Image: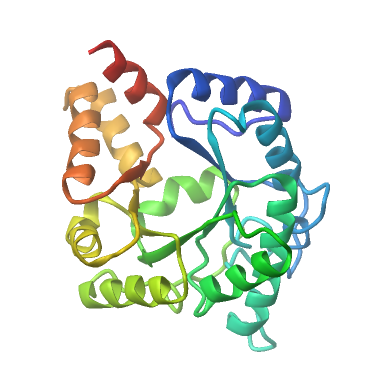
């Protein structure tokens, strides 16, 4: 992914300041731990890299940006799945919800101002909301990745975070052919108390995004994922497209379809360019 790097805590501070100066709305933090295990222990340890980075971000730019954290186990598990596995090697939904509750509390205590539930477990919104409320973190909202599809466009991100994934995630992410299921998942997460719902990926699912925007009583966001970013960069590098125009058009299409916020690797540069326009 050209222009996208893993950050040390030192370079992370500089990147946070760059984001704040650009005037974007917030940052979503992902952690790449040195060690992994079956239950993703590093996700809930106080000195785990994501929780450490969250404290840094909250301290450095918490008044200028919304500090958001990815609440999922995939980067922390040695098998690379978003949840805990049972003895047969299948994702155990209920056991995973226990870990998500623990993650939510750890992230809130670290200073997260919004938790991004990206694991696609059944009941995750209700479970996390209950855990946050019980811990007194009533003001930490939930961003539910409601319509998250089992997409081919996640590949560059998985390579960037050194994913340990064995197999695939089709048993808990949505079938790309199923538009109706995306709408149903959005409705279910809203019913469980989600403060925001997400459609992911964005550009290949603009119909799902438009459906969600038309029906959802809560804000709808969309995630322009790594594969979408990489395709634009690759085509521009080969001289096949005008890069800046393609970036702007891609973001415009997502907003036009109904997204109120777009998570994008282009966020800082687009904000700076649009400010000059």
Numbered-mark total: 0
Image coordinates for residue 196, horizontal then vertical, percent = 41, 58
> Vertically, is 260 above or below 39?
above
Q: Residue at x 19, y 37 (%)?
A: 252
Q: Is residue 219 visible?
A: yes
Q: Residue at x 68, y 41 (%)?
A: 54
Q: Residue at x 62, y 19 (%)?
A: 14
In the image, 205: left or right of 128? left
Q: Residue furthest bottom?
A: 88
Image coordinates for residue 173, horizontal then vertical, percent = 41, 71
The coloring applied to the image is rainbow
Q: Quadrant of the C terminus?
A: top left
Q: Residue furthest top?
A: 276
* Of residues 133 and 202, the one drawn nearer to the viewer in this rendering: 133
In the image, 224: left or right of 65? left
In the image, 151: left or right of 75? left
Q: Residue at x 74, y 56 (%)?
A: 106
Q: Quadrant of the N terminus?
A: top left
> Vertically, is 167 above or below 249?
below
Q: Is residue 238 visible?
A: no
Image coordinates for residue 119, horizontal then vertical, percent = 52, 66
Q: Quadrant of residue 53?
A: top right
Image coordinates for residue 77, horizontal then vertical, percent = 68, 63
């Amino acid at each position: 992914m050209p222009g996208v790097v893993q950050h040390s805590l030192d370079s992370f501070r500089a990147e946070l300041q760059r984001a704040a100066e650009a005037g974007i709305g917030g940052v979503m933090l992902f952690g790449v731990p040195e060690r992994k295990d079956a239950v993703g222990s590093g996700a809930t340890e106080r000195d785990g890299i994501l929780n450490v980075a969250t404290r840094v971000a909250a301290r450095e730019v918490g008044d200028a940006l919304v500090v958001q954290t990815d609440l999922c186990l995939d980067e922390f598990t040695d098998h690379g799945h978003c949840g805990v596995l049972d003895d047969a090697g299948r994702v155990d939904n209920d056991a995973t919800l226990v870990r998500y509750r623990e993650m939510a509390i750890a992230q809130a205590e670290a200073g997260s101002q919004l938790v991004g539930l990206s694991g696609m477990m059944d009941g995750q919104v209700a479970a996390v909301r209950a855990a946050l409320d019980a811990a007194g973190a009533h003001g930490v909202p939930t961003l539910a990745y409601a319509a998250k599809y089992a997409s081919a466009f996640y590949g560059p991100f998985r390579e960037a975070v050194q994913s340990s994934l064995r197999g695939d995630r089709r048993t808990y992410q949505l079938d790309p052919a199923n538009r109706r299921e995306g709408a149903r998942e959005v409705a279910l997460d809203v019913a469980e108390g989600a403060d925001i719902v997400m459609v992911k990926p964005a550009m290949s699912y603009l119909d799902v995004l438009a459906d969600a925007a038309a029906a959802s009583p809560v804000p709808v966001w969309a995630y322009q994922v790594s594969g979408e970013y990489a395709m634009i960069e690759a085509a521009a590098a080969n001289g096949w497209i005008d890069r800046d125009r393609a970036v702007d058009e891609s973001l415009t299409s997502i907003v036009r379809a109904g997204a109120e916020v777009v998570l994008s690797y282009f966020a800082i540069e687009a904000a700076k360019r649009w400010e000059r326009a």
